[in-house]
Protein backbone atom coordinates (compact mmCIF):
# COMPACT_ATOMS: atom_id res chain seq x y z
CA UNK A 1 0.00 0.00 0.00
CA UNK A 2 2.81 2.40 0.88
CA UNK A 3 4.53 1.66 -2.44
CA UNK A 4 1.36 2.44 -4.37
CA UNK A 5 0.88 5.66 -2.42
CA UNK A 6 4.42 6.78 -3.12
CA UNK A 7 3.99 5.99 -6.81
CA UNK A 8 0.74 7.95 -7.03
CA UNK A 9 2.29 10.86 -5.18
CA UNK A 10 5.31 10.84 -7.50
CA UNK A 11 3.03 10.76 -10.53
CA UNK A 12 0.93 13.61 -9.18
CA UNK A 13 3.98 15.78 -8.58
CA UNK A 14 5.36 14.98 -12.01
CA UNK A 15 2.04 15.97 -13.58
CA UNK A 16 1.92 19.23 -11.64
CA UNK A 17 5.48 20.09 -12.66
CA UNK A 18 4.67 19.40 -16.31
CA UNK A 19 1.50 21.50 -16.12
CA UNK A 20 3.53 24.37 -14.69
CA UNK A 21 6.07 24.17 -17.51
CA UNK A 22 3.32 24.06 -20.11
CA UNK A 23 1.60 27.07 -18.53
CA UNK A 24 4.84 29.05 -18.74
CA UNK A 25 5.25 27.99 -22.36
CA UNK A 26 1.72 29.15 -23.16
CA UNK A 27 2.37 32.55 -21.64
CA UNK A 28 5.57 32.94 -23.63
CA UNK A 29 4.15 31.55 -26.88
CA UNK A 30 7.09 29.13 -26.81
CA UNK A 31 8.57 27.40 -29.84
CA UNK A 32 10.47 24.83 -27.79
CA UNK A 33 9.22 22.73 -24.87
CA UNK A 34 11.35 20.23 -22.92
CA UNK A 35 9.52 17.79 -20.65
CA UNK A 36 12.30 15.20 -20.62
CA UNK A 37 12.99 13.11 -17.54
CA UNK A 38 9.87 14.18 -15.62
CA UNK A 39 8.56 10.64 -14.93
CA UNK A 40 5.47 11.49 -16.94
CA UNK A 41 2.90 8.82 -17.81
CA UNK A 42 0.82 11.23 -19.84
CA UNK A 43 1.39 14.37 -21.87
CA UNK A 44 -0.66 17.39 -20.73
CA UNK A 45 -3.42 18.07 -23.24
CA UNK A 46 -2.65 21.78 -23.00
CA UNK A 47 0.50 21.14 -25.04
CA UNK A 48 -1.84 21.05 -28.04
CA UNK A 49 -2.47 24.76 -27.54
CA UNK A 50 1.17 25.66 -28.20
CA UNK A 51 0.47 26.45 -31.83
CA UNK A 52 3.91 27.95 -32.51
CA UNK A 53 5.79 24.95 -31.10
CA UNK A 54 8.40 23.47 -33.44
CA UNK A 55 10.42 21.30 -31.00
CA UNK A 56 8.95 19.01 -28.34
CA UNK A 57 11.20 16.94 -26.07
CA UNK A 58 9.49 14.08 -24.20
CA UNK A 59 12.34 11.60 -23.82
CA UNK A 60 13.15 9.61 -20.65
CA UNK A 61 9.58 9.33 -19.33
CA UNK A 62 6.97 6.57 -18.97
CA UNK A 63 4.66 7.68 -21.78
CA UNK A 64 2.83 5.04 -23.85
CA UNK A 65 0.53 7.25 -25.96
CA UNK A 66 -0.01 10.84 -27.06
CA UNK A 67 -3.22 12.87 -26.66
CA UNK A 68 -5.24 13.69 -29.77
CA UNK A 69 -4.89 17.40 -28.94
CA UNK A 70 -1.33 17.33 -30.29
CA UNK A 71 -2.67 17.15 -33.85
CA UNK A 72 -3.05 20.94 -33.69
CA UNK A 73 0.75 21.38 -33.62
CA UNK A 74 1.01 22.25 -37.29
CA UNK A 75 4.47 23.81 -36.91
CA UNK A 76 6.10 20.92 -35.07
CA UNK A 77 9.26 19.81 -36.90
CA UNK A 78 11.07 17.81 -34.19
CA UNK A 79 9.62 15.31 -31.71
CA UNK A 80 11.70 13.26 -29.28
CA UNK A 81 9.86 10.28 -27.74
CA UNK A 82 12.98 8.31 -26.89
CA UNK A 83 13.20 6.05 -23.82
CA UNK A 84 9.49 5.73 -23.11
CA UNK A 85 6.94 2.89 -23.18
CA UNK A 86 5.42 3.09 -26.68
CA UNK A 87 4.33 -0.27 -28.07
CA UNK A 88 2.90 1.23 -31.26
CA UNK A 89 3.23 4.44 -33.25
CA UNK A 90 0.85 7.04 -31.77
CA UNK A 91 -2.06 7.69 -34.15
CA UNK A 92 -1.76 11.44 -33.68
CA UNK A 93 1.51 11.37 -35.63
CA UNK A 94 -0.55 11.09 -38.81
CA UNK A 95 -1.51 14.74 -38.44
CA UNK A 96 1.99 16.10 -37.78
CA UNK A 97 2.83 16.45 -41.46
CA UNK A 98 5.55 19.07 -40.95
CA UNK A 99 7.59 16.72 -38.79
CA UNK A 100 11.23 16.49 -39.90
CA UNK A 101 12.90 14.65 -37.01
CA UNK A 102 11.38 11.81 -35.00
CA UNK A 103 13.14 9.97 -32.17
CA UNK A 104 11.58 6.70 -31.00
CA UNK A 105 14.66 4.95 -29.65
CA UNK A 106 14.52 2.68 -26.59
CA UNK A 107 10.80 1.90 -26.62
CA UNK A 108 8.83 -1.33 -27.00
CA UNK A 109 7.83 -1.13 -30.67
CA UNK A 110 7.28 -4.52 -32.29
CA UNK A 111 5.86 -3.19 -35.56
CA UNK A 112 5.34 0.12 -37.36
CA UNK A 113 1.82 1.04 -38.40
CA UNK A 114 1.82 1.63 -42.19
CA UNK A 115 -1.15 4.00 -41.84
CA UNK A 116 0.88 6.28 -39.60
CA UNK A 117 4.20 5.87 -41.36
CA UNK A 118 2.94 6.81 -44.82
CA UNK A 119 1.70 10.18 -43.55
CA UNK A 120 5.15 11.35 -42.44
CA UNK A 121 6.19 12.30 -45.94
CA UNK A 122 8.39 15.23 -44.85
CA UNK A 123 10.45 13.24 -42.34
CA UNK A 124 14.22 13.49 -42.90
CA UNK A 125 15.46 11.80 -39.69
CA UNK A 126 14.09 8.67 -38.00
CA UNK A 127 15.67 6.97 -34.97
CA UNK A 128 14.21 3.53 -34.10
CA UNK A 129 17.15 2.14 -32.14
CA UNK A 130 16.62 -0.33 -29.28
CA UNK A 131 13.10 -1.57 -29.99
CA UNK A 132 11.71 -5.03 -30.82
CA UNK A 133 11.18 -4.67 -34.56
CA UNK A 134 11.48 -7.84 -36.63
CA UNK A 135 10.73 -6.16 -39.95
CA UNK A 136 10.08 -2.80 -41.56
CA UNK A 137 6.86 -2.24 -43.55
CA UNK A 138 7.10 -1.65 -47.28
CA UNK A 139 5.33 1.67 -46.70
CA UNK A 140 8.62 3.02 -45.38
CA UNK A 141 9.28 4.00 -49.00
CA UNK A 142 6.63 6.72 -48.54
CA UNK A 143 9.12 8.66 -46.39
CA UNK A 144 10.36 10.23 -49.59
CA UNK A 145 12.51 12.93 -47.93
CA UNK A 146 14.24 10.62 -45.44
CA UNK A 147 18.00 11.19 -45.21
CA UNK A 148 18.94 9.42 -41.99
CA UNK A 149 17.51 6.09 -40.80
CA UNK A 150 18.84 4.16 -37.82
CA UNK A 151 17.33 0.86 -36.64
CA UNK A 152 20.20 -0.47 -34.52
CA UNK A 153 19.65 -3.04 -31.76
CA UNK A 154 16.40 -4.53 -32.98
CA UNK A 155 15.50 -8.00 -34.24
CA UNK A 156 15.30 -7.33 -37.98
CA UNK A 157 15.52 -10.47 -40.07
CA UNK A 158 15.21 -8.74 -43.44
CA UNK A 159 15.08 -5.35 -45.12
CA UNK A 160 12.27 -4.67 -47.62
CA UNK A 161 13.40 -3.95 -51.17
CA UNK A 162 11.14 -0.89 -51.24
CA UNK A 163 13.37 0.79 -48.68
CA UNK A 164 15.79 1.18 -51.60
CA UNK A 165 13.38 3.66 -53.19
CA UNK A 166 14.44 6.29 -50.64
CA UNK A 167 16.45 8.36 -53.09
CA UNK A 168 17.53 10.98 -50.52
CA UNK A 169 18.83 8.50 -47.95
CA UNK A 170 22.39 9.40 -46.90
CA UNK A 171 22.90 7.19 -43.84
CA UNK A 172 21.51 3.75 -43.07
CA UNK A 173 22.31 2.12 -39.71
CA UNK A 174 21.22 -1.49 -39.09
CA UNK A 175 23.73 -2.71 -36.51
CA UNK A 176 23.01 -5.52 -34.04
CA UNK A 177 20.09 -7.21 -35.81
CA UNK A 178 19.54 -10.65 -37.36
CA UNK A 179 20.00 -9.80 -41.02
CA UNK A 180 21.29 -12.57 -43.26
CA UNK A 181 21.38 -10.50 -46.44
CA UNK A 182 20.84 -7.07 -47.95
CA UNK A 183 18.41 -6.42 -50.84
CA UNK A 184 19.86 -6.49 -54.37
CA UNK A 185 18.03 -3.22 -55.04
CA UNK A 186 20.43 -1.44 -52.68
CA UNK A 187 22.11 -0.02 -55.77
CA UNK A 188 19.20 2.41 -56.13
CA UNK A 189 20.26 4.27 -52.96
CA UNK A 190 22.40 6.56 -55.09
CA UNK A 191 22.92 9.22 -52.38
CA UNK A 192 23.95 6.80 -49.64
CA UNK A 193 27.18 7.93 -47.96
CA UNK A 194 27.27 5.65 -44.92
CA UNK A 195 26.10 2.05 -44.58
CA UNK A 196 26.50 0.48 -41.15
CA UNK A 197 25.44 -3.17 -40.73
CA UNK A 198 27.87 -4.65 -38.18
CA UNK A 199 26.97 -7.50 -35.82
CA UNK A 200 24.44 -9.21 -38.05
CA UNK A 201 24.48 -12.61 -39.79
CA UNK A 202 25.12 -11.41 -43.35
CA UNK A 203 26.79 -14.09 -45.48
CA UNK A 204 27.07 -12.34 -48.86
CA UNK A 205 27.14 -8.69 -49.89
CA UNK A 206 25.21 -7.99 -53.11
CA UNK A 207 27.26 -7.00 -56.15
CA UNK A 208 24.86 -4.06 -56.60
CA UNK A 209 26.41 -2.47 -53.51
CA UNK A 210 29.42 -1.55 -55.64
CA UNK A 211 27.48 0.93 -57.81
CA UNK A 212 27.03 3.29 -54.85
CA UNK A 213 29.52 5.89 -56.02
CA UNK A 214 28.77 8.27 -53.12
CA UNK A 215 29.38 5.65 -50.42
CA UNK A 216 32.21 6.81 -48.13
CA UNK A 217 31.81 4.63 -45.03
CA UNK A 218 31.07 0.90 -45.03
CA UNK A 219 30.86 -1.09 -41.79
CA UNK A 220 30.26 -4.83 -42.13
CA UNK A 221 32.23 -5.98 -39.09
CA UNK A 222 31.12 -9.02 -37.13
CA UNK A 223 29.09 -10.80 -39.82
CA UNK A 224 29.51 -14.13 -41.64
CA UNK A 225 31.28 -12.86 -44.75
CA UNK A 226 33.82 -15.07 -46.52
CA UNK A 227 34.51 -12.86 -49.53
CA UNK A 228 33.73 -9.40 -50.92
CA UNK A 229 32.01 -8.41 -54.22
CA UNK A 230 34.03 -8.35 -57.44
CA UNK A 231 33.85 -4.57 -57.82
CA UNK A 232 34.50 -3.55 -54.21
CA UNK A 233 37.47 -1.45 -55.31
CA UNK A 234 35.14 0.62 -57.52
CA UNK A 235 33.82 2.18 -54.33
CA UNK A 236 35.50 5.40 -53.24
CA UNK A 237 35.50 4.47 -49.58
CA UNK A 238 37.18 6.61 -46.94
CA UNK A 239 36.48 4.17 -44.10
CA UNK A 240 35.95 0.40 -44.24
CA UNK A 241 35.35 -1.87 -41.22
CA UNK A 242 35.28 -5.63 -41.78
CA UNK A 243 36.95 -7.26 -38.76
CA UNK A 244 35.52 -10.39 -37.10
CA UNK A 245 34.34 -12.04 -40.32
CA UNK A 246 35.41 -15.59 -41.30
CA UNK A 247 37.21 -14.37 -44.42
CA UNK A 248 38.86 -16.79 -46.86
CA UNK A 249 42.58 -17.30 -46.50
CA UNK A 250 45.14 -17.73 -49.25
CA UNK A 251 45.92 -21.36 -50.04
CA UNK A 252 47.41 -22.09 -53.46
CA UNK A 253 45.76 -24.87 -55.47
CA UNK A 254 45.94 -25.86 -59.12
CA UNK A 255 43.50 -27.55 -61.43
CA UNK A 256 44.32 -30.49 -63.71
CA UNK A 257 41.10 -30.01 -65.67
CA UNK A 258 41.50 -28.00 -68.86
CA UNK A 259 38.16 -28.29 -70.64
CA UNK A 260 34.51 -28.11 -69.72
CA UNK A 261 31.23 -29.05 -71.37
CA UNK A 262 29.12 -25.95 -72.00
CA UNK A 263 25.36 -25.99 -72.31
CA UNK A 264 23.79 -24.91 -75.59
CA UNK A 265 22.42 -21.83 -73.83
CA UNK A 266 25.89 -20.92 -72.59
CA UNK A 267 27.48 -21.40 -76.03
CA UNK A 268 24.78 -19.22 -77.66
CA UNK A 269 25.01 -16.57 -74.96
CA UNK A 270 28.78 -16.28 -75.25
CA UNK A 271 28.56 -16.03 -79.02
CA UNK A 272 26.02 -13.20 -78.81
CA UNK A 273 27.67 -11.36 -75.91
CA UNK A 274 31.13 -11.35 -77.46
CA UNK A 275 29.88 -10.61 -80.97
CA UNK A 276 27.76 -7.65 -79.99
CA UNK A 277 28.11 -5.06 -77.25
CA UNK A 278 26.46 -1.94 -75.88
CA UNK A 279 23.86 -0.39 -78.19
CA UNK A 280 24.41 -3.06 -80.83
CA UNK A 281 23.30 -5.75 -78.41
CA UNK A 282 20.23 -3.75 -77.35
CA UNK A 283 19.23 -3.10 -80.95
CA UNK A 284 19.72 -6.71 -82.01
CA UNK A 285 17.52 -7.97 -79.19
CA UNK A 286 14.95 -5.19 -79.34
CA UNK A 287 12.12 -7.61 -80.05
CA UNK A 288 13.34 -10.35 -77.71
CA UNK A 289 12.73 -9.12 -74.15
CA UNK A 290 13.24 -12.57 -72.61
CA UNK A 291 16.66 -12.90 -74.25
CA UNK A 292 17.61 -9.40 -73.03
CA UNK A 293 16.55 -10.38 -69.53
CA UNK A 294 18.71 -13.51 -69.57
CA UNK A 295 21.79 -11.79 -71.00
CA UNK A 296 21.49 -8.94 -68.49
CA UNK A 297 22.97 -11.31 -65.90
CA UNK A 298 26.18 -11.86 -67.87
CA UNK A 299 29.61 -11.61 -66.24
CA UNK A 300 33.07 -10.63 -67.46
CA UNK A 301 35.97 -13.04 -67.12
CA UNK A 302 38.67 -11.57 -64.87
CA UNK A 303 41.41 -13.14 -67.01
CA UNK A 304 40.44 -12.98 -70.70
CA UNK A 305 37.92 -10.13 -70.27
CA UNK A 306 35.33 -11.93 -72.41
CA UNK A 307 31.67 -12.20 -71.47
CA UNK A 308 29.92 -15.34 -70.30
CA UNK A 309 26.50 -16.10 -68.91
CA UNK A 310 26.62 -18.44 -65.94
CA UNK A 311 29.19 -18.35 -63.16
CA UNK A 312 31.72 -20.94 -64.27
CA UNK A 313 34.53 -20.63 -61.77
CA UNK A 314 34.27 -18.52 -58.64
CA UNK A 315 37.73 -17.46 -57.62
CA UNK A 316 39.28 -14.97 -55.25
CA UNK A 317 42.02 -12.37 -55.33
CA UNK A 318 43.66 -11.01 -52.20
CA UNK A 319 43.97 -7.24 -52.20
CA UNK A 320 45.89 -5.03 -49.79
CA UNK A 321 43.57 -2.14 -48.91
CA UNK A 322 45.97 -0.28 -46.61
CA UNK A 323 46.88 2.30 -49.24
CA UNK A 324 43.38 2.62 -50.65
CA UNK A 325 41.03 2.95 -47.67
CA UNK A 326 41.19 4.15 -44.06
CA UNK A 327 40.82 0.94 -42.03
CA UNK A 328 41.31 0.10 -38.37
CA UNK A 329 41.76 -3.64 -38.74
CA UNK A 330 45.31 -4.99 -38.26
CA UNK A 331 44.65 -7.25 -41.28
CA UNK A 332 44.76 -5.20 -44.49
CA UNK A 333 44.51 -7.97 -47.08
CA UNK A 334 40.95 -8.92 -47.97
CA UNK A 335 39.51 -11.55 -50.34
CA UNK A 336 37.59 -10.17 -53.32
CA UNK A 337 35.46 -12.35 -55.58
CA UNK A 338 36.58 -12.92 -59.18
CA UNK A 339 34.71 -14.80 -61.90
CA UNK A 340 36.46 -16.81 -64.59
CA UNK A 341 34.90 -18.21 -67.74
CA UNK A 342 36.84 -21.50 -68.02
CA UNK A 343 39.44 -23.83 -66.60
CA UNK A 344 41.71 -22.70 -69.39
CA UNK A 345 41.70 -19.14 -68.02
CA UNK A 346 42.09 -20.47 -64.50
CA UNK A 347 45.25 -22.37 -65.48
CA UNK A 348 46.77 -19.43 -67.36
CA UNK A 349 50.03 -18.25 -65.81
CA UNK A 350 50.60 -14.74 -64.52
CA UNK A 351 47.30 -13.96 -62.80
CA UNK A 352 46.71 -13.75 -59.05
CA UNK A 353 43.36 -15.53 -58.79
CA UNK A 354 42.86 -18.47 -56.48
CA UNK A 355 40.22 -21.14 -56.68
CA UNK A 356 37.82 -21.45 -53.75
CA UNK A 357 38.12 -24.88 -52.22
CA UNK A 358 34.97 -26.14 -50.50
CA UNK A 359 35.92 -28.28 -47.47
Image (spheres, rainbow, N blue to C red):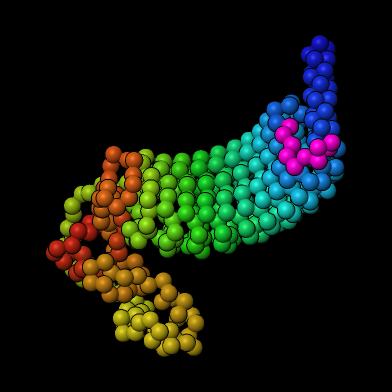
Which of these two is toward me, 127 or 38?
38
Q: Is residue 15 above or below residue 172?
A: above
Residue at (33, 44) in percent of width and height: 327
Q: Is residue 51 visible?
A: yes
Which of these two is toward me, 160 or 22?
22
Residue at (65, 42) in percent of width and height: 103
Query: Which residue occupies the extreme left position in the image?
Result: 349
Residue at (45, 43) in percent of width and height: 198
Q: Is residue 107 visible?
A: no
Does residue 5 appear to the left or right of 179 in the view shown?
Answer: right
User: What's the magenta region?
Assistant: 26-35
Residue 118: x %, y % from top left: 71, 57
Does residue 118 appear to the left or right of 220 in the view shown?
Answer: right
Quadrant, the N terminus: top right
Q: Is residue 266 magenta?
A: no
Which of these two is toward me, 259 or 11?
11
Residue 41: x %, y % from top left: 78, 30
Residue 60 placement: quadrant = top right
Q: Is residue 270 above or below residue 200?
A: below
Residue 336: x %, y % from top left: 31, 55
Residue 190: x %, y % from top left: 49, 62
Query: Which residue occupies the extreme top position in the image?
Result: 2
Query: Which residue occupies the extreme front position in the image?
Result: 28
Q: Is residue 33 magenta?
A: yes
Q: Is residue 132 above or below residue 170?
A: above
Amino acid sequence: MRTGSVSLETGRRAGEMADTLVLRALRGNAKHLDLSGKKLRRVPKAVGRLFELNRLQLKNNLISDLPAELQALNNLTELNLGNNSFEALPEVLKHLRQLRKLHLFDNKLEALSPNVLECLENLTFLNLNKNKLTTLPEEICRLAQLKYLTVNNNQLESVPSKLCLLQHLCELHLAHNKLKSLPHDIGYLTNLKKLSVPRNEIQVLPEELCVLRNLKVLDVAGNQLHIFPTKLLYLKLEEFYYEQNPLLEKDLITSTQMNEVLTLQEITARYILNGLSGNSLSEALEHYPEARKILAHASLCAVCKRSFLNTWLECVSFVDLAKKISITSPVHVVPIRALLCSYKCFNESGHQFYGIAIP
